[in-house]
Amino acid sequence: MLCIFFYVNENKSEKLNNSQILPTKDYLKNKNLQDIIFAQKKATENVFNKKNIPFRSFEIKKRNEKITTMARVILVSNLSLYVGCINKI
């Protein structure tokens, strides 16, 4: 099975409200949502690498209709390849 990650690099991102962060989650203070999402992506990729799970990772630098359509085509084409492999078993 092949996993596919899409990451959109947003220039503007909301910052977390420090007053609403629990004391046990201090490491989230002064972070914006984009930083957290990127850290989660990298952590997931590291786990996949350590466990030798195949994946593809795409970073989208600018979100627009053309890029979104290309991402959908990549996703559907990989899904059809995967389903084709299952049907041959």
Image: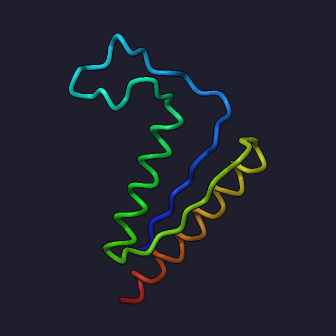
Residue 64, percent across and down?
75, 41
Q: Residue furthest bottom?
A: 89
66 vs 37: above or below: below
- Front residue of 33/85: it is 33
Q: Quadrant of residue 14?
A: top right
The residue at 63%/54% (across/down) is 59
Rendered view: 83 above or below 3: below
On the rendered structure, is 79 left or right of 45?
A: right
Of the pair 80 and 10, the residue shown nearer to us: 10
Q: Residue 89 location in percent, x, y? A: 35, 89
Identified at 45% across, 20% down, the residue is 16
Q: Quadrant of the N terminus?
A: bottom left
The image position of residue 20, as x and y in percent, is 33, 13
Q: Nearer the viewer, residue 2 or 85?
A: 2
The residue lying furthest to the top in this view is: 19
Residue at position x 21%, y 27% from top?
A: 24
Q: Nearer the viewer, residue 56 or 51?
A: 51
Note whether 69 is above or below 14 in the view shown: below
The quarter holding residue 46 reads bottom left
- Left or right: 40 with respect to 26? right
Whether 16 is drawn above or below 28: the answer is above
Whole-percent x and y of residue 13? 59, 27
| Number of on-image labels | 0
Which residue sits furthest right?
66
Q: Is residue 49 left or right of residue 70?
A: left
Q: Residue at x 53, y 68 (%)?
A: 56
